[in-house]
Amino acid sequence: MAWQATYALVHLWWAVGGAPRFLMGRESYFPGGWVPVVIAAVALLGGGAVAAGARRGVSDTCHVLLAGINAVAGVALCVYSFLFPVILVSMLFEGGGADMVVSLLATGGGAAGGVFCLVIAASERRLAVRPCEACGRVHGRSPERRDEKSPGWAYAGAYLAVGGFAARMSVWLNDTLAGRWPSAATKANGMSLTGMVVFLALMCLAGTLLPLALAHRWGRLWPAWLGPLRGRAVPRWLVLGVGLFVGASLTAYFGIAGTTAWIRGDFGGPFVPLLLEMGGYTLWGVGLLVASASYFTLTRAPCSRGAVSAEPVATV
């Protein structure tokens, strides 16, 4: 609540007295002014309602309602602050001045507030479904061990992400063969050839290895050919954290903001390449989020109450 109140007050100050100079001239591609103030107020209301309910005790229905309010506020804050990962990557690869620092702090504050709301929403949902207090599962309905097979929708999400990546890279390959890559804008930004190659390699890993690791068992248990690591658990957030970050970033930036700007006519170009690029990024991001949801449930720690047997050492 303190974080949301600070975010709301800062944006209220900017709405009344004028905003500072942001990178690219704006904090978000969505309307500014009072919009972030209202979103933060809803987030503050949701957090306050949860705090009040924790003291008094509420019904399962109220827990679901509170989860919904905080989820809506969290998604809204994250979507409004979708430029955060873009600014962060730009700062890491190119550096930046005061406007970039201000933009990073503003969008980072909104993104962090959104994550807080989503964590609260998940907690309220757990209270509504009454999971096991030791491990957070609903035994009989939730996966119990890492070596269980991912559900079909997780594989669908993973291969949707790979397909989206392939669609995006088809545009890059065409531009490269036609001599249009690297573009003049890329060269003007001062990125070195080494930086371009590193960035491209990371993109390829995020579009192939990452989604497959989120769905397949070798992404949860080290495969047999790794010798001493064989059958041991892959660090959960090594895969899940990257999947959530990349998936949310692509979905927010290209799927929501980019598509909105395209429809409004803020930029243009040949229809098919733009469709492959914007659509590819969007499917890539959504697929990663879907596969990450499955990975999250499959990689919970074993139940300490002995509801199921301990995780076996499995060969993959």
Image (cartoon, rainbow, N blue to C red):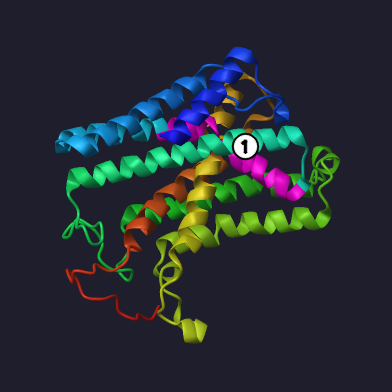
Q: Is 315 placed left or right of 187 in the picture?
A: left
Work out whether 182 lies above or below 66. Answer: below
Work out whether 263 lies above or below 239. Answer: above
Q: Residue at x 59, y 13 (%)?
A: 16
**Number of numbered discs overlaid on the protein picture:** 1
Q: Nearer the viewer, residue 128 or 285?
A: 128
Task: Please check the rendered image and state whether residue 2 is part of the magenta-colored stretch, yes or no.
Answer: no
The percent position of residue 204, horizontal first and vertical second, equals 62, 57
Q: Residue at x 61, y 45 (%)?
A: 168
The percent position of residue 70, horizontal first and vertical second, equals 35, 34
Whether residue 22 is visible, yes or no, is yes
The percent position of residue 20, horizontal first and vertical second, equals 69, 23
Work out whether 13 lies above or below 61. Answer: above
Most extreme residue toward the bottom is 227
> Where the N terminus falls, by quadrant?
top left
What residue did someone put label 1 on? 105
Q: Which residues are magenta?
A: 74-93
Question: At label 1, which amino acid type do we have?
Answer: Leu
Q: Nearer the viewer, residue 194 or 61?
A: 61
> Where the C terminus falls, by quadrant?
bottom left
Q: Is 187 placed left or right of 34 in the picture?
A: right
Task: Please check the rendered image and state whether residue 82 is part of the magenta-colored stretch, yes or no.
Answer: yes
SS for dot 1: helix
Figure quadrant of residue 68: top left
Q: Residue at x 39, y 29 (%)?
A: 44
Q: Residue at x 64, y 38 (%)?
A: 104
Work out whether 296 lies above or below 82. Answer: below
Q: Is 36 placed left or right of 299 in the picture?
A: right
Q: Main secondary structure of the magenta part?
A: helix
The percent position of residue 223, horizontal first and vertical second, equals 45, 78
Whether residue 63 is visible, yes or no, is no
